[in-house]
Image: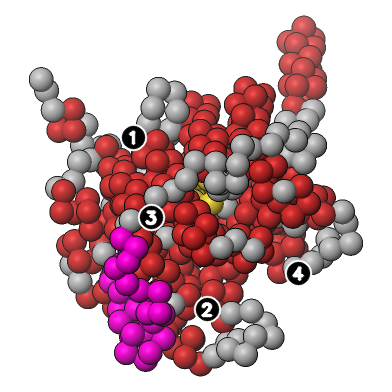
Amino acid sequence: MPDNNKKNPAAPVDERLPWRQLLIFGAQHVLVMAVSPVTSVFLMATALGFSSELTLQLLSATFLVCGLGTLIQSLGLRGCGARLPFIMLPGGAPIMLFILIAQQNGVATASGAVILTGVFYFVVLPIFRRLLRFFPSVVVGTMLLLVSVNLIKLSGELIVGRPGSPDFAAPQQLLLAFSTIVITVLCSRLLRGTLGQLSILLGLVGGSLLALALGAFDSTQLGWWPLLSLPAIMPFGVPHFDLFASIPLMLFCLVSMVEATGQTVAISEAVDKPLDISRDVTRTIRGDALASILGGFMGTSLIITSGENIGVIRATHVRSRYVTAVSGVLLLLFALLAPLARLIGGIPEAVVGGTSLIVFAIVGTMGIDMLRKVDMRHHGNMYVVSVALAVGLLPILVPGVYSHFPDGVAGLLGNGVAMGAVTAAIMNFFFHCVGRQEIAADTKAKLSHSTHTH
C-alpha cells in the first residue's frame, strides 16, 4: 500500500511525528491551556457553593469532556470533527451563563440547558451553513484581532489579579509573568530543533521553577491521595429541561458558531490546509455540539473549540493534528489521576498569564496578516473593519458599558468578539452584497444599449 504521507508532503496537518515528540508537543498544548478548565470549575464551585468532593468530580468531568472533544476534533468521526489541531475547553461566557441559570432555576435546569443547547446546534446548523459565505477574510481577520485583544485582557487579569484585592499588581506577580516571557523568547531565539519548538513549554516550566524558588507555587493541594478522581454521570441528578431558561445559552450558541467559523479558517491557514469552509466549519460545529451534550450529562457547561492553541501552533510551527490528539489523551489522564490535576492547579496564575500573553498576541498577528491581504483603500472594507472594531472593542475596553440592559441582552452585547464579528459580517453584506445584482443588471443593460446603438 503506498504511503500517502510521502506522496503528499504538503499536508503537515496529517504528519505522524515520533511518539516522543507527540508526547512532548501534546503536553505543551495541555499545560498552556489547562488553566481554563481549572479556573472554570473553581469559579462554578465558588459561585454555587459546591463541596470539595463535588468540585473534584466536576474538575475530573471537565478534563474528561475536554479530552474526548479534543480527540473528536483532531481525529474526526463520520461527519463530526474538523480533523484539525483543536483543543476543546469550557468557554468563559458559557460558564457565567450556566451559573446564572443555576442560581435562578437550579443546577439540574442548568445541566438541561446545556444539553438542549447542544441539540440546538444541530437544529440551526443547516441554516447557519448557508450564511458562511458572508464570512470572508475581512470579517475573519477582524474577529481574530478582537479575539486577541480580549484574550490579552484576560491574561493581564491573571497576572495582576482583581482590582481592590490586597495583592493586586504585586511586583512578584509581574516579575513571574515577565520572567516567563523572557525565558520563552530566549528559548525560541537560542535553541534549535525540537527544543526551539518547545519554547512555550520551557518558558512555562522556567516560570514555575522561579515561582517555586520564590515560594509562590501553591503546594498546599499537592499530594498523592486520592490517587483517582472518577467523574460522576448526572452529578446534579436527572437534568431538568426548561426551554425558556435555556434561551441565554442558545443565544450564545449562535455566537459560538460565528467564533468557530473564524477559528476554523484561522487554524486551516496556520497548518496550510486547503479549506472547504462549508464542510470543515460544519464538522467543527458538530464536534462542539457533541462535546457540549456530553458535558451536560457530566455537569459541565458548554465545551467548545478554543482559538488559543492557534497561537501555540504559530509559535512552534508544529502543525500535526496528532499532537492535539495526544493532548486529548493527556486530558483524559488528568481526568482520572487527581495528583496531575492538582499539579496543574498549583501553577501560579501569573506564570500562566505570561505564557498566554505571547500565545494570544500571536493570534492577533494572524488577524493582521489576513487583513493585510484585504484592499483597505476600498472605502467599504475600511468601514467594515473600523465599525466592527469600534463595536467589538467597546465592551472589552469599557467593562459594564451595557450594565443597565437586561441580563441576557447585556451578556450578548457585552461579548465584544461576537458583536464585532456579527457587525463585520453585516457591514460586509451591506457594502459588498446589497445592490450588486441591480448594479450588474444595470451594467448589462447599458452594454446592450451601447451595442445596439453602434
Q: Are marks 4 and 3 in contact (CB under 8 Å)?
A: no
Residue at 41% across, 86% down: 216
- Element class at badge 2: helix
Is residue 392 shown to the viewer in this render? yes
Residue at 74% across, 55% down: 103
Quadrant where the C terminus lies? top right
Mark 1 crowd level (few <14, some 14–19, many ≥20, 10 Å Cα):
many
Q: Is residue 437 above or below residue 30?
A: above
Whole-angstrom CA distance, mark 4 to mark 3, is 41 Å
Mark 4 crowd level (few <14, some 14–19, many ≥20, 10 Å Cα):
few
| Label of residue 75 in the image | 1
374 vs 196, left or right, is right
Magenta segment boundaries in residue numbering = 201-227
Closest to the observer, 4 or 44: 44
| 202 magenta-colored | yes
Picture quadrant of residue 136:
top right
| Mark 4 lies on residue | 398
Q: How is the image coloured?
A: secondary structure
Q: Are marks 2 and 4 in contact (CB under 8 Å)?
A: no
Q: Are marks 1 and 3 in contact (CB under 8 Å)?
A: no
Tag count: 4
| 317 magenta-colored | no
| Mark 3 lies on residue | 229
Which kind of residue does numbered mark 1 sit on? Leu
